[in-house]
Amino acid sequence: MRILSGIQPSGALHLGNYLGMMRPAIELQEQGDAYYFIADLHALTTVQDAAAMRANSRDVALDFLACGLDPKRAVFYRQSDVPEVTELAWLLSVITPMSLLEKCHSYKDKTAKGIAASHGLFAYPVLMAADILIVDANVVPVGRDQKQHVEVTRDLAIKFNLKFGEVFVVPETRIRDEVAVVPGTDGQKMSKSYGNTLEIFLDEETLKKKVMGIVSDSQPLEAPKQGLEENAAWRILKLVAPPSEFAEMDARLRAGGTGWGDLKKKVFGCLWEMFAPARKRRAEFAADLGGVERLLAEGAVKARTVARRTLDRARNAAGLNPLAEGRRPLTP
Ligand code: ADP
Ligand code: TRP
């Protein structure tokens, strides 16, 4: 099994990113060849400030390593360090129907939120297809919001294979139902663009404040609580508490005499504890940024080795000269 996933360096990692994508990806690294990368070229559609890009890329590298990405098992790299990806994106572009991209909701959602309607934003799913196809991935762990992009990837792989011969592996999405849509502090999908996130590496006071700000209704403290399935704090607790502790809090809420404040304190306690080991590891990696850079550089070399082979197959199938070492002289 070959697994690939990526995350954009476009802001601090939140619980939705962690549960929806990062944790499943990290668990999968035990089960196959994993390729995990920092999608900086994708982030460039929205992060257009060099200092912010550098800082965000470094932060997301630290987040991924802190959360348990094991560079001995997984190939870990920056997307922009593997330029073969952008070349493959062009080869895919020429067989991508406009109508396929016009259907993608991510473009519509982002432009509706005021992000400039650039060509890059529109072509974003094609670049994502190149990320996936270039390493011959067959499994792509992501949250539900990325499902459509993996379907585009499948369509493009099948289309290219039909037109030019069997070049690409057709991948599958891997979505965990229980964490497909992690709720934010307002009960909608947690997302940085909704301002409802709980960032997992926040300092204690700020995280506590955010958790205590989770919206709830006005049932009084004494009341046996109703409609718990609609309550954002209850839904989040279910995802972060050990099952026995969740069951106990659930029973207390249903019995009455336990208020939303108690529930939120429990959410905070569980979150803080859940990420304690990762916080420690993150600080260790942060103290060795040179080492992190070296890991990413080694990852890029490994990813490029695979990428060049796939790109070569695609070039050859399309009637372009191969790229492989020794077969492409620099002078005519
Ligand atoms: P955001 O919505 O905050 O901008 P991204 O779109 O950058 O997050 O998502 C990065 C990864 O995290 C993707 O794989 C996405 O599916 C996953 N993800 C983001 N938010 C959630 C969520 N609320 N629930 C589950 N997965 C999520
Ligand atoms: N589009 C993804 C996101 O916003 C990030 C991403 C880029 C990705 N390329 C990918 C995820 C390839 C999985 C596979 O979260």
Image (spheres, rainbow, N blue to C red):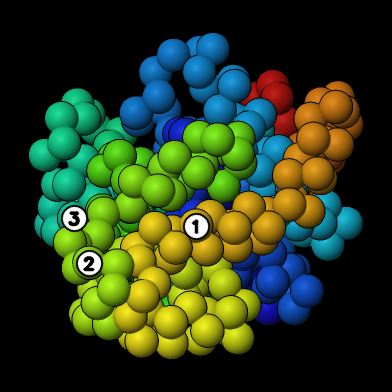
Q: At which x and y percent is residue 108?
A: 14, 47
Eyeballing the image, is 312 above or below 142? Answer: above
Q: Is residue 86 visible?
A: no
Residue at x-position 33% and y-position 80%: 256
Q: Write down the residue under mark 1.
A: 265
Task: Decide which of 228, 83 is in the foreground and name it.
Answer: 228
Q: Which mark is residue 156?
A: none
How far apart marks 1 and 3 lie (CA) works out to 36 Å
Q: Write down the residue under mark 2.
A: 220
Dot 1 alpha-carbon crowd within 10 angstroms: few under 14, some 14 to 19, many 20 or more: some
Secondary structure of the residue carrying tag 1 is helix
Q: At which x and y percent is residue 70?
A: 81, 56
Any atom of ligand 1 within 8 Å of the CB at mark 2? no
Q: Write down the residue under mark 3.
A: 105
Q: Quadrant of residue 195?
A: top left
Discs 2/3, front: 2
Dot 3 alpha-carbon crowd within 10 angstroms: few under 14, some 14 to 19, many 20 or more: some
Task: Name the amino acid, label 1.
Answer: Lys
Q: At which x and y percent is residue 153?
A: 39, 64
Eyeballing the image, is 166 above or below 129? Answer: below
- Total tally of numbered discs in the picture: 3
- Marked residue nearer the N-terminal end (2 or 1): 2
Q: At which x and y percent is residue 186?
A: 26, 53
